[in-house]
Amino acid sequence: MMLDADTCHAACDAKDRRFDGRFYVGVLSTGIYCRCICPARTPKRVNRTFWPSAAAAEAAGFRPCLLCRPERAPGLAPIDAPARLAAAGYARIEAGALEEQGLEALADGLGVTSRHLRRVMNAKFGASPIEIAQTGRLLAARRLLNETALSITEIAFASGFRSLRRFNATMKDRYGAPPSKMRGRKVLTRGETFTVSLSPRGDYNIAPILDFLSMRALPGVEIGGAKTYARVLKWGDALGWLEVGMGQKGLMLTLSENLAPHLRPLVANVRGAFDLDAEMTTVDAHLATDPSLAKDVKREPGVRVPGALDGFETAIRAVLGQQVTVQGARTLTDRLVAKYGTPLERGPEGLSRAFPDAVALANAGAGAIAKIGLPMKRAETLHRLAMASCDGKLPLARGAIASGRAALAEIAGIGPWTVEYVAMRALGDPDAYPATDIALINALGRKGETLEHIKPWRAYAAIRLWRRGAKKGLQT
């Protein structure tokens, strides 16, 4: 965002949640930087400075506030094209992309050069990708220190540091104290789970997303309820489970402890999957310009896009859902999970198996996959997806919109509907729109309409139309 001083001062005075995470307040009298909603006494105007990101504030010498906890702030909502690119880069960095692949590969996945990505991110956040990554590691470590009972060594590696020595030195240099001195006062004990808070942008209505996920929940893999969503998840070599739901303290994420070393990318993934960073005021205002959507927006504001926690799984399920009903797709997917899914030995009641990973389906072969009741051509498409994923040729991480779309389009058996659906849910493309979807056509009542006039938010229109159709019994 452009840092207009009057707007920032007004947001601080009102502790306006709409601006939470869109900028940070550096307090000259204390050397601390805060969110605009900080519960502490509001600093005098003369002592306020404004920064476009936590990384920029820290680069200027400010330390994060212990009360408002900048590491819990929502991310920036993408609006225009440069902002969308910057936000996508930021999300990928928060998910650990620089540790996994480096800047050149990250930029390539976003469809730009590394030089252009650095320029856009510096303009948007006042900090380079490397500086943003470093601040992300430090803030992730602060969260783990304060919200889990993990050891210092476990926290160092979970935060993205490659050595304990480097972790200790960086924390002391940046925050003035070693990690051992930064634990919260509350004594935490290790258990089978741990819980961290999530901060959505603005008012958050979880019901539409839970409705969407519950309708498609796979027995043994997922449990969708009125207030929570839980599922088994394989992340790297770790097999565990997580639950997202609204509690007395707001939106909370509970994880099995074996997933704790992956907290940083998992939080980033959950934020994307539950669309926590969307600027819904802007989105809804744009959708309301279409007369056919205006009533939906007025009746139910803030309907967000249900994303995905596993991009490969979403692609497989999209292919299984081609030209069949939601119930039909679930039946086929149940069979695939029963045959190739990984059992979860210790989990809550109702969660017993992980969705098959790419290696399992690639090793199975198309002929064996077809035996779940699929036409051979569709089984071959699933096998090609698995092979491409194993070969590293199928980038389906959130934000990799350009490269992900291109990779999907190259796979035989993947048509425009599947590309748009996966782009919407797995890649996080806010403008994805599967215009040939029969449920969308029926709900909209206008065949061949691509809703060009409400770009770049057509994914939000699709979710609303699917929701409208489901209520009228038109959902496929």
Image (cartoon, rainbow, N blue to C red):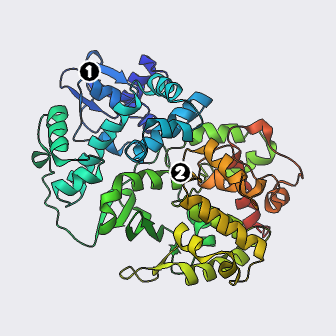
Marks counted in the figure total 2
What amino acid does circle 1 point to? Lys
Which residue is situated farthest in the right direction here? 447
User: Which residue is labeled 2 in the image?
Assistant: 397
Disc marking residue 44: 1
The image shows residue 369 at horizontal and vertical percentages of 66, 78
Residue visible at 38% across and 22% down in the picture? 9
- Seen in the picture, residue 30 relative to 464 is either above or below; the reply is above
**In-image side of 87 versus 388 (left or right):** left
The image shows residue 84 at horizontal and vertical percentages of 57, 35
> Which of the two residues, 198 or 389, is positioned nearer the viewer here?
389
For the residue labelled by badge 1, is the local secondary structure a helix, a strand or a loop?
loop
**In-image side of 38 versus 279 (left or right):** left
What amino acid does circle 2 point to? Ala
Disc marking residue 103: none
Residue visible at 41% across and 29% down in the picture? 11
The image shows residue 269 at horizontal and vertical percentages of 46, 54
Taking the image as drawn, is residue 215 in sight? yes
For the residue labelled by badge 2, is the local secondary structure a helix, a strand or a loop?
loop
